[in-house]
Amino acid sequence: MPHAPTRPRRVSPEEVRALLGQPEPMVEAKVQTRIDDHFRRFIAHSPFLTMATADAAGRTDCSPRGDYPGFVKVLDEHTVALPDRPGNRIADSFRNLAENDGVGLCFLIPGVREVLRVNGSGYVTDEPDVLVRMRTEAKRPELAIVVEVAEAYFHCGRALIRSRLWDPASQALAEGMPSMGEVAAAQFGADVDVGLLERALEDGYRNLY
């Protein structure tokens, strides 16, 4: 009879701190409570971010967001806003923010090793003055997420260096991966027309704007 899997041991916060030691004072001092000129410039050049939210029970969700560089707008030094572009309509982030306003953003710029992290509280808005600033190809979003900034700081580039994320040679890792049509056929059943699904996906990608 097979043994039940054993859960890895939990390590306490005290043990973690004992193993890692204390951060350098400069590391702690880098955390700002506003969007300064350096953060503003980074956001203006960023075409991609990840956004983490959680519901009232603490169940988390992290979703990718991307558009032309600068799609996220700095409304003032304490507030940023990101548009809601067409997606899968599941609206996990919206539902979470209605229950728990905590939100964390990680901004990336292709070729830049450092990541800008912004943490704060968020809510959904349909304010016309905000939405009009996010017009793309003559299309204005219906909704936006406003983030009131509590923390903003640059995260060192070690993760991106180790992952070789911006190394063109790393793109070879995609070779041999199944297509999303093949994945859907495997997950949802053999009745899925793989070719039809993949053509629909490609058409959707081409018609983003």
Image (cartoon, rainbow, N blue to C red):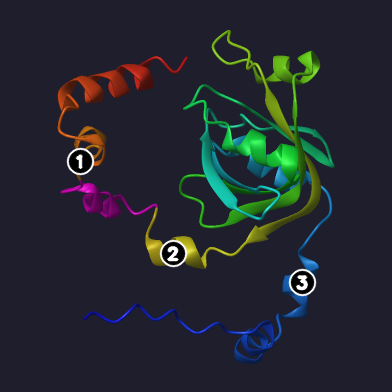
Q: Is residue 114 above or below residue 96?
A: below
Indicate which disc, 3 or 2, sits on the residue closer to the N terminus: 3
Foreground of the two, 155 or 86: 86
User: Identity of the amino acid at label 2?
Assistant: Ile
Q: Is 87 displayed left or right of 143 in the figure?
A: left
Q: Secondary structure at mark 2?
A: helix
- Report the residue marked by disc 1: 186
Foreground of the two, 86 or 164: 86
Q: Secondary structure at mark 3?
A: helix
Indicate which disc, 1 or 2, sits on the residue closer to the N terminus: 2
Q: Secondary structure at mark 1?
A: helix
User: Identity of the amino acid at label 3?
Assistant: Glu
Give the mark toward the camera: 1 or 3: 1
Figure quadrant of residue 28: bottom right
Label total for image: 3
Marks 3 and 2 in Cβ contact (< 8 Å):
no
- What residue is shown at x 37% (from left), y 22% (from top)? 205
- Report the residue marked by disc 2: 161
Task: Name the quadrant of the N terminus.
Answer: bottom left
Figure quadrant of residue 128: top right
Marks 1 and 3 in Cβ contact (< 8 Å):
no
- What residue is shown at x 66% (from left), y 55% (from top)? 58
Q: Is residue 146 above or below residue 167?
A: above
Foreground of the two, 3 or 200: 3
Foreground of the two, 190 or 119: 190
Residue 180: x and y in percent read: 26, 36
Q: Looking at the rendered structure, which numbered label has been put on residue 28?
A: 3
Q: Is 82 displayed left or right of 110 in the figure?
A: right
Indicate which disc, 1 or 3, sits on the residue closer to the N terminus: 3
User: Is residue 179 in view from this perspective?
Assistant: yes
Give the mark toward the camera: 3 or 2: 3
Q: Looking at the rendered structure, which numbered label has been put on residue 151?
A: none
